[in-house]
Amino acid sequence: MDIKSIIDKIILHKKQPNLRYCLKEKTEVFANTLFYTLFDIDTPVEENLKKLEILFDELTNLACWEVEKPCSELWKKYVSKLPNILEKLNLDAEATVNCDPASLSVEEVYMAYPGFYAIAIYRLAHELYIDGFPLVPRLMTEYAHRQTGVDINPGATIGESFHIDHGTGVVIGETAIIKDHVKIYQGVTLGGLYVAKNLQKTKRHPTIESNVTIYANATILGGETVVGENSIIGGNAWITSSVPANSKVFHTPEIKIKTQPHVS
């Protein structure tokens, strides 16, 4: 096969007319610029907001494939929400300082805690998601996922003072609802009990009420599953039905230790 035939066949099979990877790259720049604008003390807010508006305009041009949708009107609405998002993120950072005895300062949380970074990008993405602009938020949270190992779908609903400790392997599904003052540890999954395309419009992921702690590698599944307030879910627990308020749920493994007899 000559080179022209190869080129023609590749072009023939490139079937996605809107698939432009520069959208992914520009979204990552947008997410980082947002993060610096909100937190870095040396970053000028007014100047960066102008940069962000330009970046956002580029994103809407790339991501708004249906021209009748007024994506260009989103920026003013979105930027007005940034002070409230920052206020919530400060509460998240304070929750981490208060929860984790290893944290040395709130500055350390902002700069070094993957859980906080994932929450920050989620909160910044979520407001765009609820305004009906889904692709860019999804790219934002996937960027945070790649950076931190924490996978939070931008459609999830998360209350105030949320803390993720360590973070690696955490998965929070699109229709999960997490109330206030919730703490989760590495490897926790808030997932769907069933996987089928016809469930796309239904609540597939659990609800976690306020003041709940979920320890490492616990799995909580199902849209009708509710973990009641003030409950503790132990590590490695597998939960597919609701848990009453003020409960403690533990998985008890059977551990056997075999030793070889002493050989002289």
Image (spheres, helix red, strand yellow):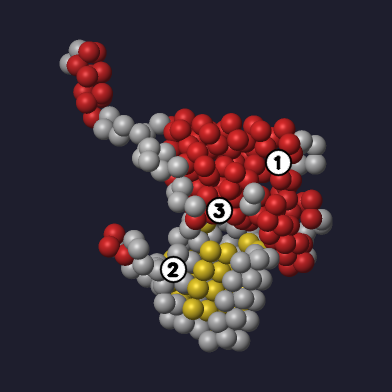
Q: Are marks 3 and 1 in contact (CB under 8 Å)?
A: no
Within the image, what quadrant is residue 4 found in? Answer: top left
Q: Which mark is residue 205?
A: 2
- Mark 3 element type: helix
Asked if residue 217 shows in the view, the reply is no
Badge 1 is on which residue? 37
219 up-or-down from 120: above or below:
below
The CA span between labels 3 and 2 is 20 Å
- Looking at the rendered image, the disc whose residue lies closer to the viewer, 3 or 1, is 3
Residue 17: % across, % down: 31, 32
- Mark 1 element type: helix
Left or right, 161 with respect to 12, comes to right
Of pointers 2 and 1, the one earlier in the residue sequence: 1
Write the residue at 50% across / 61% down. Answer: 156
Q: Residues within 10 Å of mark 3 (few under 14, many from 20)?
A: many
**Nearer to the camera, 100 or 230:** 230
Left or right, 226 with respect to 77, comes to left
Name the kind of residue labelled 3 in the image: Glu
* The N terminus lies in quadrant: top left
Q: Which mark is residue 127?
A: 3
Of pointers 3 and 2, the one earlier in the residue sequence: 3
Q: Are marks 3 and 2 in contact (CB under 8 Å)?
A: no
- Looking at the rendered image, the disc whose residue lies closer to the viewer, 3 or 2, is 3
Of pointers 3 and 1, the one earlier in the residue sequence: 1
- Looking at the rendered image, the disc whose residue lies closer to the viewer, 2 or 1, is 1
246 up-or-down from 146: above or below:
below
Name the kind of residue labelled 1 in the image: Thr
Write the residue at 68% across / 56% down. Answer: 84
The CA span between labels 3 and 1 is 17 Å
Write the residue at 50% across / 83% down. Answer: 243
230 up-or-down from 142: above or below:
below
